[in-house]
Amino acid sequence: MAQIWARSESGDWEAVKVGGDAFALVAGPQPIARPGTEAGVLCRRFAGRGRETWVLLSAPSVDLRVNGAPLLTGIRVLEDRDAIQLSDESPTYFSSERLAEVELFPGSPEAVYCPRCKTEIEAGGAAVRCPGCESWHHQSESFGCWLYAERCALCDHPTALDAGFRWSPEEL
């Protein structure tokens, strides 16, 4: 799930989860609003093949910059860590980083095998999709494959469910 990093009223960076298929970007301490507001900037999600793409759409009258450059065409596919700045406001940052969480495996047209135990993951079974490599691992009472080790079976992503984000604008 994507998020927008914005400064809170205390000045700390805060990740605001983006839900649904669209949201409006607005100036001020709460940068995310429902679509249909008079913001002039819309972010729209397109999903397919297990991935999601977010597209930034802007009215020509809006003073909008992405990574410091004006958005002249009014449209841009967002990438992880893009800096988005409305007028003279402080920039916000788009992030596509996901946190590891136990969820029901949605199933797949082809069989999906857990890289740790090598058995098939059944649709509707408890599993974790690695935020690093997007591989699915079992995580149930019967098969605790995700939490079995400190790292994903296929990449170096930590398996702790409370690991938090690996990046924040604080690093800039």
Image: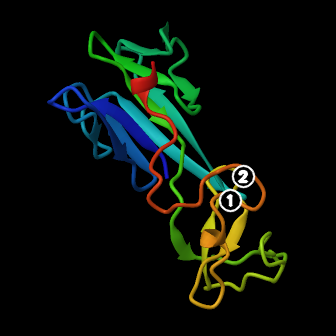
Residue corresponding to mark 1: 50
- The residue located at (33%, 27%) in the rendering is 40
- Structural crowding at the residue carrying mark 1, measured as other residues with C-alpha within 10 Å and reported as few (<14), some (14–19) or many (≥20): few
153 left or right of 92?
Answer: right
- Type of amino acid at the residue the image marks with label 2: Cys
Question: Which callout, 1 or 2, points to the residue nearer the camera?
Answer: 2
- Type of amino acid at the residue the image marks with label 1: Gly
Which of 31/144 is in front?
A: 144
Residue corresponding to mark 2: 133
Give the quarter of the image for residue 8. Answer: top left
Q: Earlier in the sequence, mark 1 or mark 2?
A: 1
Judging from the image, the colouring scheme is rainbow
Label 1 secondary element: loop
Give the quarter of the image for residue 127. Answer: bottom right
Instruction: Please provide percent x and percent y for residue 90.
Output: 29, 17
- The residue located at (57%, 33%) in the rendering is 80
